[in-house]
Every structure is written in structure tokens, then in C-alpha cells.
Amino acid sequence: MKQVYKWFCGAACALFALPAFAAFNIFACTPEWGALAKELAGEKANIYTATNALQDPHHVEARPSLIARARSADLVVSTGADLEVGWLPLVLTQSGNPKIRAGQPGNFEASRFVVMLEVPASLDRSQGDVHPGGNPHIHLDPRNMAKVAAALGERMAQLDVADAVGYRQRTQNFLERWQQAILRWEKEGAPLKGMAVVGYHRNMTYLNAWLGIREIGSLEPKPGLPPTTAHMSELLTRLASDPAKAVVRSAYNDPRAAEWLTGNAKIPAVTLPFTVGGSDKAKDLFGLFDDTIARLLAVAK
Amino acid sequence: MFRRNLIAVAVALTCAVPAYAQDAELAKIRGEIKQMRDSYEKRIQELEKRLSEAESKAGKAETTANKAEQSAGRAEGAVVAASAARGAGRSAENSFNPAMSLILQGSYARTSRDPNQYRINGFVPSGGEVGPPKRSFGLNETELNFSANIDPYFRGVAIAALAPEGGIAVEEAYFQTLALPEGLTLKGGRYFSGLGYLNEQHQHAWDFRDAPLPYKAFLGNQYKQDGVQLKWLAPTDLFMEVGAELAAGDRYPGSAQNKNGIGSSSLFGHLGGDIGVSTAWRAGLSHLWTSPKDRSYTDTDALGGTVTNSFTGRAKLLALDGVLKWAPNGNATERNFKLQGEYFRLKQDGTLTYDDTAQTTPQFGTLRSGNLQTDQSGYYLQGVWQFYPRWRVGYRYDALRYGTLNNGVLAAGPTAADMPLLANHSPSRNTLMLDFSATEFSRFRLQLAADKSRSGAADNQIMLQYIHSLGAHGAHKF
């Protein structure tokens, strides 16, 4: 038994020798905020992204690695609006890091800086996985991204005072490029206006609102519930009278339901990256929107 | 409001108009009512139109405001102010109510042996509620959870268990620090000890209906403490935490005693991390020390009389635990696998006293004492596979090793037949489960077990169980 202790203590000492004392540690809950942080912080910060594009952001576990990374974080960037309610509160409490507690400057919730859509009038779990603050998938409207970027850049400047000027400059630079990109995307995406699609989960709401895409139904019978055969045949009937151009799902959604519907309704399926890393071309935020619009245009004809 | 009253009065009048009222008059009244209704609807439509106009104007104003703020480079403060203004008016007396949730649980059980006669043979009884549930339909504990931040420095959690037969037990009730620096967290009150893996989780979050045998035999199902716990999380990328606990030690393997100072102490350490994007793991080592005094249990002597045996001495428990979770690309929504196992070893050294003086015609009539030394162990290994969204299947094997048990009482008069509970037996069990979770808030489970906790034939158990949670969305530990 003594040997076990020796081994344990030995390992403990060895690991303690390699702490993550970087200049400024950012813990991004989802890839889009990680990518945004990268744009604004440049090379100055150490950015850790807790999830990848193939993970359902609703169902993430409070893994030990997340707790360890949160321990040394100076800033946690989350979506908020209860998207991360199943794991982030636990990670924050377990991390023993008072800087990133809810309400502290080190805790940044992006959804606080945009106008929320689909805020439920009444809260009842019989409606499925509803979020009291509104639909939390805010990042697919680039105008929201601009609002969040401005607020996040300012927050970084406040927290990492030594480089405040740098953060403000990079934020300014990003916003200029971003506003130009928005104009370009809006021009490119003009043919998408009024296009009818079937979604998977209601996670494209902001994208649809921005581009004027009409989502006539979701594969999920209610938010968060897996597609059922009954609901799918109902959708099929509805498509007969109100045809859609495509079935749209994000990279992390199960492809089977979308395939079934495309096979039966004879309309194409399109897989959107949803977030940075969700496709080969979605390497950064610009690539995310370039690829999203290109993929939608491909099925809009 | 006045108009609506008018309509009501008019309607009432219409009804009250006697039968001889002329049709012309009736038609006139009806016409008036229609007019009123029409003008009312028109006004409502106008109001709605104005409202939507105002809303869209507000939206536009916000967008412009935001743009202006961005270019000015001071977006945050102003937007915060704006959203604060949006949220104003929500303040009420109940705004600070804690997060509340309720867990509903019940089961249907069928067992081949009497659950009331449940024993873990070969091991000193741990005193917890370790047996299978009662036969037929039964309600299990209903759990009531409250939690909230107390102030900027502390967080409070209370979990009450409403027993099906009535009465409330405090499962956990503790405060936890929020603002200690350097990765330190202090917890105080009643809480589940950080030793092992399953111990800190609530029973409703377990993958099987009941605890594995080592938990039942060595920790009375689950080890809760009244005490303080200090935890430190290392500032490394690898998850590494160590913790120490000081507590009253009034539960098995300790015992309630009227003494100043500390009844039990424990140390634990956990390591954890990721292997690629698909796998996450955690491993731990814990140690518990406690000194029970007059910790008693009852047994049946060779003549069928009740005997009280009590132990005074020292108990040391070592626990090793490990868990590995796998999901393709880390996306556990569709499919995932969880492998988990723990090993416990309990050593006890002290004096055991055999007392049959309470019987009317005792065999001995005086206390008989001897040295008791035990070195016993147990483990479990389980795998749970979510093979389809909502559906999981799991298998668990758990076993206890009788190991060494030197009972000095047997040299002082009583024979092995007078202490049947400590007779050589190494229990084991095979358990299979299948569960369906419609959402993360509801779960139905079927569990089949062949339980050889008792010597003799296996107890074949079939259990159907539901676990539903309502209220605040709780986060589950890894």
C-alpha cells in the first residue's frame, strides 16, 4: 500500500511542476466563442475550447478536464440563456476559481448582449427543452456576433489591462472586417430570402431570421426530443402542401432522420457546419458563414 | 371597462325582456350590441397595430444604438444598462428563492427470498438500509433539493429525503465557499464524503437501482458525514484534486459516540483528463480512518436467542476508483459507453464483546470478549452502453472477499454457531439493467439480479423503477 502512495505522491509532484500559468487564460464553452476570442485576443492569450462542433452543446458532461481548465481561467465565455446549464455551473463551483463565478467580470455570457428570439411566454417542460431566456443559439446571426465581439473585446481589455489598447485595436479591426463581410454575405444570401426549409432542432432560428429563410418545421417534435416516426410522417404530409427546398441539420445532429425525410420527400439534405470546425471550410468565423451560405445557396436553386 | 359593463347590462336586459317585447325592439338592441362590439374590435386592432409599430421602432432604435456603441468602443456598459432596463420590473419578493427540484421515485419488486431477512453474510452489518426494496409496488425516497448562493462568499445546498413511510431525513445540508483563492473549496455541514467515485453521487444518478456490495458492506450504502471538507484543485491542465475531511464519524465503519474531538478523518485524491476527443477518465485513491466505540449489531445464537455484539477499536478503509467514459467525438447524445469500477479494503482491529445478558435464559449470562481482527475487501465492475438515443443497457458484477477474520470471542466461550453472521462467506452478485429515458428528466429502469449476499440459494430479483425529476435543471457530476 505504501508503494501506491509513493506512486500517487510522485505523480502529483511531477504534474505540479507543469502548471498552466499563461498570461491570460480564456475558457470558451463552444467553438464559436473560442474562434471569436482568437480574433480578439490574437496571440496574446491562451484559449481553451471546451467542446467541439460535433458535440451537442446541450449535452456536455462536466468532465474532469473542463474543471481543471476552468481552475486557471481568467475569463469564461459562454452563451448563457441556460444553454450550458447542465454542466457549466458544476464546472464553475468545482473549479474553486472565484474569478469566473456567475456575475464576476471573468464570467462572460454572450446572450446578454443580443436581442433574444423565441422567448417563451410560459415555461413548462411539457413543451420540451425550452430555455426561459429565449432561443440560445444566437451566434448564427452575424449581427449578433458583432454585438458580442464589441462587448467581449471590451471585457478582455478590462481584465487584461496591460494589453487593453491591443484588445481594443483588434476588436476594432475585427468589427470593420466583419461589417464588410456581413454586407457581402447579405448580398450573396439574397436569393435565400423566403426559401422554405425543414430544420432539425430549433438552432438555426437566428440564421433564418437574418437571411429571411422560412423554417416550416423541425425534425424534432418538440425542442430536445428525438424525431419520432409519427412526427416525421406528419411532416411529410405537411411538405406535400407546403414544399420545402431542403432539410437542414447541423453537423452534430444524427443524420438518419434527415436522410429518411429527404428520401421520402425527394428534397435534398444540407448539413451546415453550425459552428467553427463543423466543416472543413469553417475554420474560423468568416469561413463558418462563407460555408453556411454557400451550402444553402447550393440547394436554393 | 365601462363599455364592457354596458354590454353585460345590455345582454342581461335582452334576456330579461319579457316574451311580449316586440321583435323590432329586440332587433334594435341587437344592433346596438353589434355596433358596440364592432367599434371595440376596431379599437383593439388599432391598439395592436400601434403596439407592433412601437415594438419595431424600439428594435430599430436598439440596432442603431448598438452600432453607435460599437463604433464608440464602449458597447458593453451601455448594452448592460439597456438589458438591465429590459429586465427591470421583474424584482419581487420571491426573486431570491433558491433553485428547487424534486425527485420522484418508485419501484415494483419481485424477489425470490424475503427482503426483510436480507444479510450480507461473512461481514459485520453496516447498519445502513442495504436490503432490496419491499416486494410488490413501493414508493422510494422522494428527494427535495434546494440550492442557492448565500452571499458572495458562500453557497448553500440542502437535500431532504421524504421517506415513503413518513418522516423527513436530511440527506445533505452544507455550505460551500465560493471565494477562496488558489483553487481551495471548503465545505461544512452534512455531505457525502469525497471518497470513492459513486459515494458523492446521489442514488437517483446511479446507473443501477442499488449500491454495489462493497458500498453496502463497508459504508452502510453511502458514506455521509457531519463535518468539514477542504479540497484543493491543482492549477494544472490535468485534473488533480486532493481533499481532507474531518467529521464526527458516527456512521459505519465508525459509531456514534459522546466525545469531544474528531471521530473520523479521510484523505482523497483524484486525477482525471481526456484521451483524444472521445474519451474522458477519472481515477482516485481515498483513505478513511475512524475509531468506533461500542459499535453494536445483533446476531442469533445457537439456541435462537438474540445476542448483541459490540466492537471497540480502529477501522481503516482504503478505496480505489476509476471511471472511463467514451462517446464518438465526445457527443454522448446518440451513443456512449461508461466503464466504472471500485475496490474497497476494510481493516479493523479491536475488541469484540459478546453480550447475551438480555436473554431470560442466557447460555453464558456474562460478557465474553476477545480480539477481533478483520482484513476484508470487495469490488465491483460495471459497464453501461447507450446503444440508441434514450436506451441504455448495463451489466455489473460485484463481489466481497471474506479475507481474514480472526475472532477472539470464539476462544472465550461462544462457538461459531453463536455468531453465524461472521461465518465464512464471500458474497457476489450479477446484475443486468435496461433503462429508457424519454428526456433527461425522466427514466424507467428494469433491473434483474442474482444476489448471493446471503449464504444459500441466490436471491433472484426483478425490479422496475422510475426516477423523475421536476423543477430546476440540476447538473450531474461526471
Image: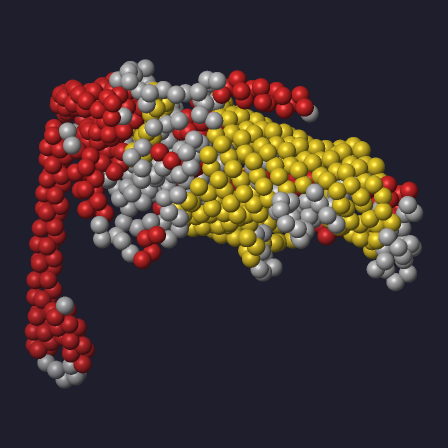
Residue toward you, B239 or B331:
B239
* Residue B6: % across, % down: 12, 73
Horizontal and vertical percent for residue A49?
36, 24
Judge from the rendering whether residue B398 lies leftward or rightward of residue B98; answer left or right: right
Q: Is residue A299 visible?
A: no
- The correct choice, above or below, for B307 with respect to A243 in the image is below
The relative height of residue A210 versus residue B191 in the rendered view (above or below) is above
Figure disc tally: 0
What percent of the width, then of the height, locates residue B32?
8, 70
Residue B84, by quadrant, is top left
Q: Residue at coordinates 34% horizontally, 28% vertically from top-left?
A: A74
* Above or below, A124 relative to B332: below
Q: Which residue is painted at 25% across and 38% down in the image?
A: A112
Instruction: Tell me the quarter of the image containing the N terminus of chain B.
Output: bottom left
The way the protein has been coloured in the rendering is secondary structure
Residue found 69% across the figure and 48% down from its top:
B255
In the rendered image, is residue B262 in sight?
Answer: yes
- Give the percent coordinates (x, y) of residue B204: 54, 44
Residue B327 vs residue B111: left or right? left
Residue pushed farthest front? B260
Q: Nearer the viewer, residue B66 or B238?
A: B238
Nearest the camera: A195 or A58? A58
